[in-house]
Amino acid sequence: MLRLVLIAVPFAVLVAAVTGCATEDGTASPPRLVASFYPLAWATERVASESFGEVVDLTPPGVEPHDLELSPSDVETIRDAALVVYIGGGFQPALENALDSRDGRTLDLLQDEDDAHIWLDPVRFAKAVERIARAVGGAGSSSDEIRELEQLEQEYRRGLAKCERRTFVTTHAAFRRLAARYGLTQLSLGGRSPESEPGPRELEELVAKVRESGATTIFAEPLVSDRIARTVAREVGADVATLDPVEGLSEDRLAAGEDYLSVMRDNLAALRKALGCR
């Protein structure tokens, strides 16, 4: 079957092409939208037209999206959705396999990027939000979100302009684009997948690089073990703190009112403290 990748389809065409599921009284329910994990669901829900029904986040709260496993009902949800918004390039292999058997439209936000973590760069994420809005919201539907992302970008630019150190250490190589945007250097103890851990010899080399960098903080993240971060921190005499790649929030954090914007601002505060910014 042919999978169509939606770049920019007029909103009216998309709505006309999709029929909702029938309810018990025989009326058609609004077609659902599917987003592959939290930041994409956050954006899609905010810009989607009322002509659509709920936005389904395929990755449950508190689950690392790289580890996503699909149930038969998940596969059915993907098959029946009006649109599936996702990031390709092997970021979530189970989802991409399921999309191979889908006839409907999909929106791959990766495009020509070589790093899947586009939502951690407010400039790149704003462009992604615009693409989502063109697909499901119509003209101007993303204006509020774009303004919020522009404000976030300005906060990062001002907040990271004058710092004692320019290198920060993470356990997950998710922040390369963010670092490049603001003139920083990310030193990662792992790969682009958070489960990727260094071997003993590589770990020894990394400890030497961390010492050389002068970093005083090793950043772990909420959804995976902080074992490597604590091991390196102990070796170099550094603190351990949290830098959240915003790949998913727990139910408790969502219930407490946290969202993409608040977590990104928490990240900025953590970076400023670790880098000695003024």
Image (spheres, rainbow, N blue to C red):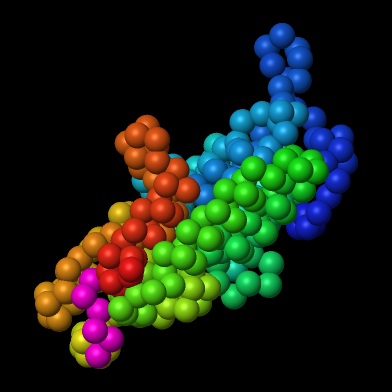
In the image, residue 139 sits, relative to residue 215, either above or below, namely above
Residue lying at 71% horizontally and 9% vertically, measured from the top left: 25
The answer to whether residue 55 is left or right of residue 194 is: right
Figure check: 196 above or below 15: below
Q: Is residue 216 magenta?
A: yes
In the image, 177: left or right of 125?
left
Question: What residue is rendered at 21% in x and 87% in y?
Answer: 211
Residue in front for this viewpoint, 34 or 260: 260
Can you give x and y, in whole percent of width and height, for residue 231 in the image?
A: 16, 73
Is residue 200 found inside the magenta-colored segment of the image? no
Q: Quadrant of residue 95?
A: bottom right
- Quarter of the image for residue 141 reads top right
**Direction top: furthest residue:** 25
- The one nearer the camera, 18 or 189, is 189
Residue 275, position as x, y percentages in the image:
30, 72
Note whether residue 259 is visible.
yes
- Residue 62: image location, x then y, percent: 36, 45
Q: Quadrant of residue 144?
A: top right
- Residue extent of the magenta highlight: 212-217
The picture places residue 6, in percent across and down from the top left corner, at: 77, 54
Closest to the observer: 91 or 13?
A: 13
Q: Quadrant of the N terminus?
A: bottom right
* Left/right of residue 6 with respect to residue 244 in the rendered view: right
* Lateral position of residue 256 relative to residue 201, left or right: right
Q: Residue at x 37, y 69 (%)?
A: 172
Q: What is the number of callouts on the image?
A: 0
Given residues 98 and 132, the one toward you in this image is 132
- Residue 135 visible, this orientation: no
The quarter of the image holding the C terminus is: bottom left
